[in-house]
Image (spheres, rainbow, N blue to C red):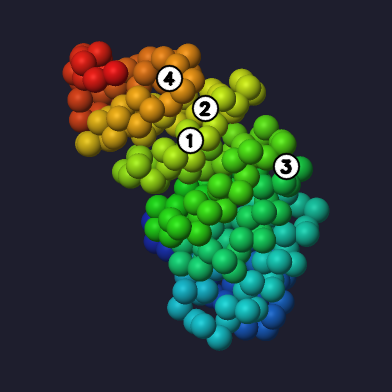
């Protein structure tokens, strides 16, 4: 029976059991139960497990080294679900302590399986929201990597921070404006749209785009921004017509 087939009380009991099992493993410096939960087919079981790791790391200083040692061991697993969950657990730790998981993020970024690489994107998003400086420094290292997928993943990963603070990521996005790879370029246009529809964000994005040199890309980004104001009209601060008018008047 999957996690969400259980009723609320049963789910709470299962969460407690998973947390207790993981804590017991950590205290014994073993990973038997951790591996079991990290490799579970149910996404929500794995999520409960990596959230438990993050919580224990933040609450008990004595167990930090054991947790990090465990994660560095499990990232070598042949099971992609385990490696994916290691990255997600590392993302929870990186919210407060990025330097200790930076090597794990690097390994995940170059993993052979897309689910592990996608976990890096998700982790960069949540870490960047709370622990910006080291995460952006990490992202900047890979903006011009030879592998187009690495560039695309980094571009996508910094998106969430930009939804509230576009000024923080626009300098990094600008460095990708002449990227010739379609997947990277399309992701860049997508991200520019995603960081432009919340309160105060359109103005910041448009002001920055005025100084970009790739006018063709800027034109595509403006179309995406206008379109986003319709697709996300229930969340956008401006209507599509208001966004279009602002753009026409200011760029």
At a point 44% along the width and 40% down the height, the residue shown is: 171
Q: Earlier in the sequence, mark 4 or mark 3?
A: 3
Q: Position of residue 122 (x, y in %)?
A: 52, 46
> What residue is pinned by disc 4?
218
Q: Nearer the viewer, residue 148 or 35?
A: 148
Q: Position of residue 218 (x, y in %)?
A: 43, 20
At a point 62% along the width and 83% down the height, the residue shown is: 27
Q: Nearer the viewer, residue 251 or 246?
A: 251
Q: Earlier in the sequence, mark 3 or mark 2?
A: 3
Crowd around label 2: few <14 · some 14–19 · many ≥20 (10 Å): some
Q: Quadrant of the C terminus?
A: top left
Which of the two discs, 1 and 3, sits closer to the camera? Answer: 1
Q: Distance of mark 3 from mark 2, alpha carbons? A: 27 Å
Q: Earlier in the sequence, mark 4 or mark 1?
A: 1
The reply to whether callout 4 and callout 3 are in contact (CB within 8 Å) is: no
Task: Name the element at disc 1.
Answer: helix
Task: Name the element at disc 3.
Answer: loop
Q: In the image, is residue 193 above or below residue 39?
A: above
The reply to whether callout 1 and callout 2 are in contact (CB within 8 Å) is: yes
The reply to whether callout 4 and callout 2 are in contact (CB within 8 Å) is: yes
The reply to whether callout 3 and callout 2 are in contact (CB within 8 Å) is: no
In the image: residue 201, left or right of residue 86: left
> What residue is pinned by disc 3?
113
> What residue is pinned by disc 2?
177
Crowd around label 4: few <14 · some 14–19 · many ≥20 (10 Å): some
Task: Name the element at disc 4.
Answer: helix
At a point 48% along the width and 35% down the height, the residue shown is: 173
> What residue is pinned by disc 1?
173
Q: Earlier in the sequence, mark 4 or mark 2?
A: 2
């Amino acid at each position: 029976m999957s996690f969400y087939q259980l009723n609320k009380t049963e789910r709470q009991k299962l969460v407690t059991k998973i947390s207790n099992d993981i804590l017991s493993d950590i205290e014994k410096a073993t990973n038997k139960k951790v591996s079991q939960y990290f490799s579970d087919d149910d996404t929500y079981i794995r999520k409960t497990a990596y959230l438990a790791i993050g919580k224990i790391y933040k609450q008990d200083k004595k167990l930090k080294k054991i947790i990090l040692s465990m994660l560095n061991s499990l990232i070598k697993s042949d099971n992609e679900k385990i490696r994916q969950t290691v990255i997600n657990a590392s993302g929870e730790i990186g919210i407060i302590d990025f330097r200790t998981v930076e090597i794990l993020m690097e390994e995940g970024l170059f993993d052979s399986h897309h689910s592990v690489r996608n976990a890096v994107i998700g982790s960069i998003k949540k870490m960047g929201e709370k622990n910006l400086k080291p995460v952006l420094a990490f992202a900047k290292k890979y903006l011009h990597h030879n592998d187009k997928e690495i560039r695309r993943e980094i571009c996508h990963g910094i998106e969430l921070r930009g939804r509230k603070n576009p000024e923080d990521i626009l300098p990094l996005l600008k460095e990708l404006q002449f990227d010739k790879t379609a997947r990277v370029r399309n992701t860049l246009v997508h991200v520019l749209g995603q960081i432009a529809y919340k309160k105060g964000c359109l103005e910041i994005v448009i002001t920055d785009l005025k100084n970009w040199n790739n006018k063709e890309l800027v034109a595509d980004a403006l179309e995406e921004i206008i379109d986003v104001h319709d697709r996300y009209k229930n969340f956008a601060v401006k209507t599509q017509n208001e966004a279009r008018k602002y753009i026409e008047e200011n760029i």
